[in-house]
Image (spheres, grey):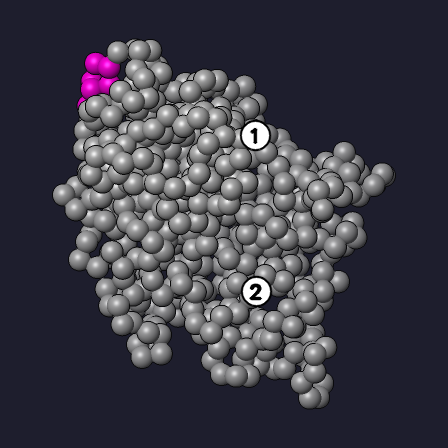
Amino acid sequence: MVSVGSVLGIGSRLRLNLYLIEMLAVGLVVGAQPALSATCESLLSLKLPDTTITAVQSVAAGEFAPAPVPPGPPGARGAGAGAGGAATYSGLPAFCRVVARLTPSSDSDIKMEVWMPLSGWNGDFQAAANNAGANAALQGVINTQGLATALRAGYATASTDLGHDGATASYAIDHPEKLIDFGYRAFHEMTVKAKAIVRAYYGSAPKFSYLDTCAAGGRQALREAQSYPADFDGIAVGAPGNNWTHIQVWSLRDFLATHKDAASLIPQSKFALIHQAAIDLCDTLDGVKDGLIENPMPCKFDPGVLECKGEDEPSCLTAAQVASARTIYSSAINPRTKEEIFPGLEPGSELSWAAHTGGTQPTLYVQETFKYMVFKDPNWDYKTRPFDFDRDTMLADKLDHETVNADGAILKAYFARGGKLLQYHGWSDANIAPRSSINYYLAVAKTTGGVSKIQNSYRLFMEPGVGHCRGGEGPDSFDTLGTVVQWVEQKKAPDQIVASRIVNGKVVRTRPLCPYPQVATYSGTGSTDDAANFVCKAP
């Protein structure tokens, strides 16, 4: 048997030991609850470590609205901003809603909610990560959209505000415990306490626990697998922002390069020009002309082919614009060590570059991260304090101390207990460079003994033409949760995933997504819009 402690570092072993102690404490407390006899309202008196249940509510079918729960003890709080429109909650089944406050440290104030079906519980738990709404990566808000989705599918579910309010990191200054809560502790504490509440209510613990998320939620998901391997049995994660500080360094690098002066800015009207040139060169590398670059890695597109021969025109790029485009495609490199900080974007991503470099200021994530998490200076501005890509990147890594970043590539403990990890990333993602997922996958393989050693536990699927989590020109719709559930419960690893492109409610193309490094290869006959005419092969 693999020893969990033997495959973790000292810090991780300490977190794991504390975790096991906490699980024992929760189990002892919950074990005293009357099995199968709890009512929703009785949960108000449930006692759990570092937990105050502030309100409970039996919600009738179809009656939930994202508003505060009825008055309860001090501290009761309902859903926050970004909760979604009325259609999000239309037709919800009846459920028991529990609102709680968690205080694992003296400076913690973590809000969480647990929703449990009054009938028809499928016996499992699904957490809702913080990946819904604008600026989700920073939002301190209960993800009621995610709760509603899980509840409809029969799951008991939970979400947390990560210990703060609003889309800001301002809480981080002089509050290291709150930064820890945001980084990993709040989500883990929510998961442990939610399972305890589920057990108290139904009289039995969830049989399986799942997490299905993307982007900001992906950071949380990978941290769970790294530090708390017993929290989830199956995780589906897309485009994870796990190396948080390096993403912000890379994003700032591209902003500075494209806003160095007026000449360096690429007008958004030219993004389609660059995109089409990339497609024209690389579309048929896979033997199929379909408007998609199946695998951008062999694509040797140079935006210099679009350089103007004379004056600037809409149909060409100036020399300064070519230089900016080349920067966007290139990796951010530490100028002293020559090590890669974060990979660049891929050919095919151009239509989404506005989200990355189109603003008049660096992204909110860049500003919040460096103001409050790294420099601890609310007045920091990239214009008045020039960023040093060697010194300041190292400072960000030093201050993080594995708090916000989730780039630890040791998942042996998670795999050893049977955990399954399904990861996917769109090749046309312009928010988080897709090669970061490949880098992480290969790093995990290296620490686990090679790709062959992780195939039964971890598979990565790259999505041609797909943007950030969803969207873009490629097939982007598939059942992420259903795929990982089948893997966990039926021991059937996905050899391919059929994804669909849906336009105006109609499926116009299907295509297999293949486990990395395989790619979808056309059989030579039949429609290229039909997944049945493709097989997964090594490139």
Q: Quadrant of the N terminus?
A: top left
Nearer to me, 273 or 128: 128
Q: Mark 2: few, some, or many residues within 10 Å (few <14, many ≥20)? A: some
Counting other residues with Cα less than 10 Å from the Cα at mark 1, is it few (<14), some (14-19), or many (20 or more)? some
- Measured Cα–Cα span from mark 2 to mark 1: 31 Å
Residue denoted by label 2: 353
The amino acid pointed to by label 2 is Trp
Q: Main secondary structure of the magenta part?
A: helix
Which residue does the image show at 33% across and 36% down from the upper left? 69
Identify which residue is drawn at 58% across, 71% down: 325
Q: Is residue 283 left or right of residue 427?
A: right
Compared with residue 397, is residue 536 higher up or lower down, i.e. above or below?
above
Residue 91 appears in the figure? yes
Q: Residue shown at 26%/20% (left/top)?
A: 42
Q: Position of residue 245 (x, y in %)?
A: 36, 57
Q: Is residue 509 above or below residue 204?
A: below
Q: Position of residue 429 (x, y in %)?
A: 56, 55
* Segment colored magenta: 25-33
